[in-house]
Each structure stands twice: as C-alpha cells, then as structure tokens.
Amino acid sequence: MHLFSVLNFLDISPNNGKMILVLERGVKDVLDILEITKISEVIFMKRIILTGGGTAGHVTPNIALIPKLKELGYDIQYIGSYEGIEKELIEPFGIPYHGISSGKLRRYFSVQNFTDPFRVIKGFGEARKLIKDLKPDVIFSKGGFVSVPVVLAGKKCKVPVIIHESDMTPGFANKIAIPSASKVCCNFPETLENLPKGKAVLTGSPIRQELLSGNKIAAMDMCGFTADKPVILVIGGSLGSVIVNNAVREALPELLNHFQIIHLCGKGKTDESLKNTKGYCQFEYIKNELRDIFALADIVISRAGANAICELLALRKPNLLIPLSAKASRGDQILNARSFERQGFSLVIEEEELSKDSLLQAVQNLYDNRSTFMDAMRSSGQQDSIDTIIGLIEEAASPE
C-alpha cells in the first residue's frame, strides 16, 4: 500500500479501493475532509526537530540518524545557530534549517559573559516561536550551547525532548538541559551514575553508516599517494588544534621517512609552506570524502572527543589520542581517552607530555602493535546505537 506523504495540504491516493490520507499532526478539520471525500484512513506524519551545534561532534550523530528517520517517514527540521558549523553540515541534506541566536555559558570570566545570556534569552524566544509554528512530535538534541534554548522551549511547549550526552560526564549545556528532557542517552556505563534515574539510557553514539564503506583507492588518487608506505590520518577536531598541528608538523620530516600523512587541520589552519610536500596532504575539513580517507588510513592521530573516538572504534582504526588539556576544558576528553586506553583501544599522550620525540615514539609503537589494538576493538561488541535511539524517538513521538 503506497502512502502519499504531504504537509498542510494533501494529496489523496486511491489504492486497493481505499482512500488514504497522510497529514501532519495539528492539521484541523480532518473530520470535515473525511465526510467530503469518503477517505477510509488517515495517517498522521510525524515531525522531529533535531538540534545541536558549535562543533562537528554536536552535529554528526544527528546526521547519522537522518537516513533511518527518513525511512520511517519523519518530516525533519533542524534548529542551529545562524552561522555555526552545523548550518554548513546540515544544508547539503536538503533539511529545512532554522537559525536562532546563540550564546556560550562559560565557567570562566569573559567580557562575553555579560552579553551572551541575552543571546540565550533571545534564542529561547526564537526557538519557542519555531516550535509553536512547526508543531513537532519530538525534539532530539545532541548538545552544544545552541541546543539549550531549544530544549528549554521544547519543555515549555510540552514537546518531549531526548538528549544525547557523548562524554563520560555531562557538559555544561546538557547539565542545564537535562531537567527539561524526558530521556538522556549516553555512551559510557560510568555516565549512568551522573544522570537522573529513569531518564538515563545507555545507547552508544550514532555512527554515520557511510563511514563503513569507503574507497581507499579513491582517497589514494585524491591525495596523490602511493601504495608503498602506510598512511597516518591526523584529526585535530572540526575546529582544528594548533597544538596537535604544530607537533605533527615539527615531526613531519621524520614521519615522512616511513609514512604518508593526511592532515585535517581545521578551518584556516593549513600551512601554505607545506602545500607541495610529497607524501603530505592537508585539508581544512573533509565531508563527503571522509569515508574514503578513513578506509585508506592505517592508524589515526586524533583528539579525544567522544563522537570521534566512537567512530574510530566502529572503524577498528588503531589510534593515538591527544586529549584536550584540562587547563583548556573540563577534562572530559582526558576521561574519554583513558577509558579507551583501559579497554585496549588506544594509546594516549596528554598535551603536557606532547613533544616531537614522544609523538614519534608513540606513532611507531602504535603502528608496530596495530593488530593488537584492532583485535581489542573487534571484540568490543559495538552497540546498535541508531536503532536504540530511534526506538526512544518513536516511543516519545507516539505517546498514545
């Protein structure tokens, strides 16, 4: 039986003697339409708002859910900041994108602490208006400060909200948002201890399925590499890491004796003086070709954001993690990295220990023992996080 999906106004299809109408929730006068057209059945299309932004790690898990949500017939809308990275990442999927004001709530002193709360308040008003207009059945938030006004407005409008917390301990934005959520998804068993009982669900992180089907030959051609040397992929996070970038570039002459290197540097952080260096290929950020680059990489040097390391686990890529220092963060990446180290998935160098020599030694150790790390990851029993989270969304969107 084929259903014609429509919003606000309708397309009606006869099929096997039945007239079936698909409507969004909230459309009025359905009974009048039924009396006029003799329609046999009315099916209400579900609508979901996805939110999250600031870094790619607050967006890519949402992207991983999109194919399954489309398969289930959801109308998908996205709320993010006006010019954040989330806008750039979401728009290619053809999903309606709605910008709101966003401000960062900091634990440390900054002049912006006096202005950003007003941006958050403005964002709350904008999110509330959008939610009233869009009438979603459920909201799914991946965190980041742009998500806070959306989650709070969702509760105000009595829309069920599901939050995903990637790190071992909840971030500041999610700590504010958790009281307004009906369910909180998480990646680590330890996280359950820090979340309200009855709300917390261990789901793992949604991984973009296309990452599992890369073409290493395509990546080799794109980078101009040969097959005679192994490949290191360096990921400094979507915003890039000056510390990781500088350490890799300092060690570059020695690394290039044994490896070829793909370096994702972050926006505005490529080094023009290295542009034509043989065996070294640098990009600000990669989207569509990322799966091919992952397929080509033998080992990975990465920050330790939860979504990034969950992707490395799913791809079974031996990795060296350089977590963001506790001096520049709340230390969540250090906890994530040490958890993966304990499970035998990763080697770890903390920023304070990072040097040319420590990097070279760790890279060689990682490569020499790569099969051991791959075996540990292979036996980890990766959870089917997408289906688990979709199940929670379906339950929230169909309370009856």
Image (cartoon, grey):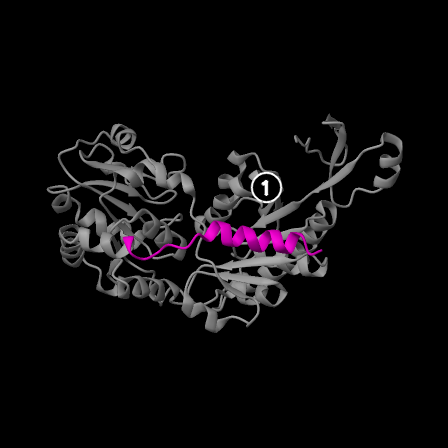
Q: Is residue 284 visible?
A: no
Whole-percent x, y for residue 184 in the image: 54, 62
Amino acid at the residue labelled 1: Leu
Q: Is residue 397 magenta?
A: yes
To which residue does mark 1 refer?
72
Residue 160: tell me if it is visible.
Answer: yes
Q: 174 or 240, which lies in front?
A: 174
Within 10 Å of disc 1 (Cα), the crowding (few <14, some 14-19, many 20+) is few
- In the rendered image, the quadrant that contains the C terminus is bottom right
SS assignment for the magenta stretch, majority: helix
Q: In the image, what residue occupies the spot 67% across and 44% down?
A: 46
Occupied quadrant, residue 21: top right
Q: Position of residue 197 (x, y in %)?
A: 55, 72
Q: Secondary structure at mark 1?
A: loop
In the image, what residue occupies the spot 77% across and 30% down? 19
Range drawn in magenta: 378-400
> Which quadrant holds residue 309?
bottom left
Question: Looking at the image, which is closer to me, 107 or 363?
Answer: 363
Find residue 152 and report its image quarter. bottom right
Relative side of 383 to 162, left or right = left
Magenta stretch encompasses residue 81: no
Residue 198: x, y in percent?
57, 69
For the N terminus, the image quarter is top right
